[in-house]
Image (cartoon, helix red, strand yellow):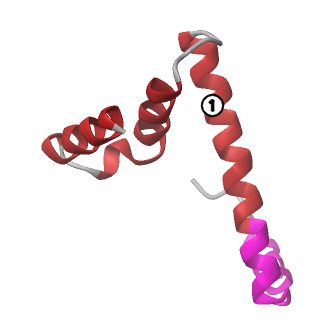
Amino acid sequence: MNDTLPDVAARYRRMIMALAPAERAAMAGRMFEAARALVVAGIRERLGADVSERRLREEIFLAFYGRDFAAPERERILAHLRAA
């Protein structure tokens, strides 16, 4: 879904592209960290605040990348995370 008016989207793109590449990269990093914090909070809400670090890593992987892999590959990655 895109509910942004085309002229507003174009203006926003011009503003972003006017930033230095390093600042755009820093913004992306901050947005990812914010998204990760929200995902972690949701996991802790669902599984409890005392969820193990291993299970937390697995759940973070599934939240961000779980649908990007076929089941066999996803299970191989999860097995690797469990062994770590």
Residue found at x 61% / y 34%: 39
For disc 1, the marked residue is 40
**Region of the chain picked out in magenta, as a range:** 5-27
Classify 48 as above or below 2: above
Tag count in the figure? Answer: 1
Residue found at x 21% / y 37%: 75
- x, y percent for residue 41: 68, 26
- x, y percent for residue 48: 60, 9
In this view, the residue farthest toward the left is: 72
Front residue of this view, candidates 72 and 11: 72
In this view, the residue farthest toward the front is: 84
Q: Is residue 1 magenta?
A: no
Element assignment for label 1: helix
Classify 18 as above or below 79: below
Mark 1 belongs to which amino acid? Val
**Quarter occupied by residue 11:** bottom right
Classify 24 as above or below 81: below
Q: In the rendered view, does 32 fall on the left or right side of 22?
A: left
Q: Residues within 10 Å of mark 1 (few under 14, many from 20)?
A: some
- x, y percent for residue 17: 78, 87
Q: Is residue 13 magenta?
A: yes
- x, y percent for residue 64: 47, 45
Residue found at x 78% / y 68%: 27
Q: In the rendered view, does 32 fall on the left or right side of 11?
A: left
Front residue of this view, candidates 1 and 33: 33
Q: In the rendered view, does 58 fall on the left or right side of 56?
A: left
Give the prevailing secondary structure in the magenta stretch. helix
Quarter occupied by the C terminus: top left
Residue found at x 73% / y 56%: 31
